[in-house]
Image: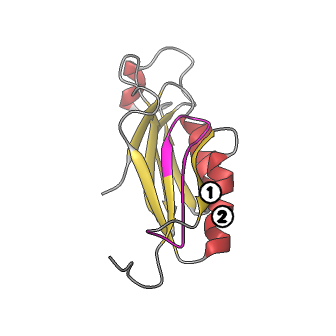
């Protein structure tokens, strides 16, 4: 399972931002020269028909949806990332939250060594989690 994010013309910016934060390799197909271009307005040849970012955390798909099919920014999706190093998690969280909103700061909690939640500058919500060393006593 992987998230598929739909935007109205900013998918390249989104994928480049996530690649800077998460690393990985991009696979991009643009509308120009594809049958899907028929659904797009003139001048959309360089928009993203299909984009996938393959990272150590998993994959994220993003596209510039045809008119009327873009999702509402934020929607009902939060992408969770489990990290195995506090410093790496802090770095990922800082990059994802840059220009966005920190909902919960990346810090120690009762359920994780570190946990943070943010909405990035594109309105997508993220959770970065460094699992506890031992189970929490109840």
Q: Is residue 20 left or right of residue 66?
A: right
Relative depth, front residue between 84 and 5: 84
Query: In the picture shown, does residue 83 fall above or below 77?
Result: below
Residue with the mark numbered 1: 93
Looking at the image, can residue 69 be seen? Answer: yes
Question: Percent x, y for residue 32?
Answer: 50, 30
Identify the residue shown where x is 47% and y is 29%. 73
Q: Dot 1 surroundings within 10 Å: few (below 14), some, or many (20 or more)?
A: many
Relative depth, front residue between 108 and 97: 108
Q: Dot 2 surroundings within 10 Å: few (below 14), some, or many (20 or more)?
A: many
Q: Is residue 43 left or right of residue 40?
A: right
Q: What mark, if any, has residue 10 been given in the picture?
A: none
Question: Percent x, y for residue 66?
Answer: 40, 23
Relative depth, front residue between 26 and 21: 21
Q: Which image quadrant: the N terminus?
A: bottom left
Relative depth, front residue between 11 and 123: 123
Residue with the mark numbered 2: 90
In terms of secondary structure, where does tag 2 sit? helix
Residue 31 magenta-highlighted: no
Q: Is residue 5 left or right of residue 9?
A: left
Colour mapping: secondary structure
Identify the residue shown where x is 48% and y is 43%. 125
Question: Percent x, y for residue 31?
Answer: 47, 31
Magenta region, residue range:
111-126
Identify the residue shown where x is 32% and y is 76%. 138
- Disc 1/disc 2 C-alpha distance (Å): 5 Å
Identify the residue shown where x is 62% and y is 50%. 96
Farthest residue to the front: give it. 138
Looking at the image, can residue 50 be seen? Answer: no
Q: Quadrant of residue 39?
A: top left
In terms of secondary structure, where does tag 1 sit? helix
Labels 1 & 2 near each other (Cβ < 8 A):
yes
């Amino acid at each position: 399972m992987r998230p598929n994010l739909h935007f109205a013309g900013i998918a390249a910016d989104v994928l480049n931002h996530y690649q800077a934060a998460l690393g990985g390799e991009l696979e991009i197909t643009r509308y120009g020269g594809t049958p899907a271009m028929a659904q797009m307005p003139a001048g959309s040849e360089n928009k993203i028909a299909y984009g996938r970012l393959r990272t150590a955390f998993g994959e994220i798909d993003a596209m510039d949806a045809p008119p009327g099919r873009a999702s509402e920014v934020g929607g009902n999706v939060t992408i969770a990332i489990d990290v195995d190093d506090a410093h790496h998690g802090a770095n990922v969280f800082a990059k994802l939250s840059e220009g966005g909103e920190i909902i919960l700061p990346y810090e120690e909690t009762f359920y994780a060594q570190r946990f943070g939640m943010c909405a990035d500058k594109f309105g997508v919500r993220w959770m970065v989690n460094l699992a506890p060393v031992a189970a929490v006593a109840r």
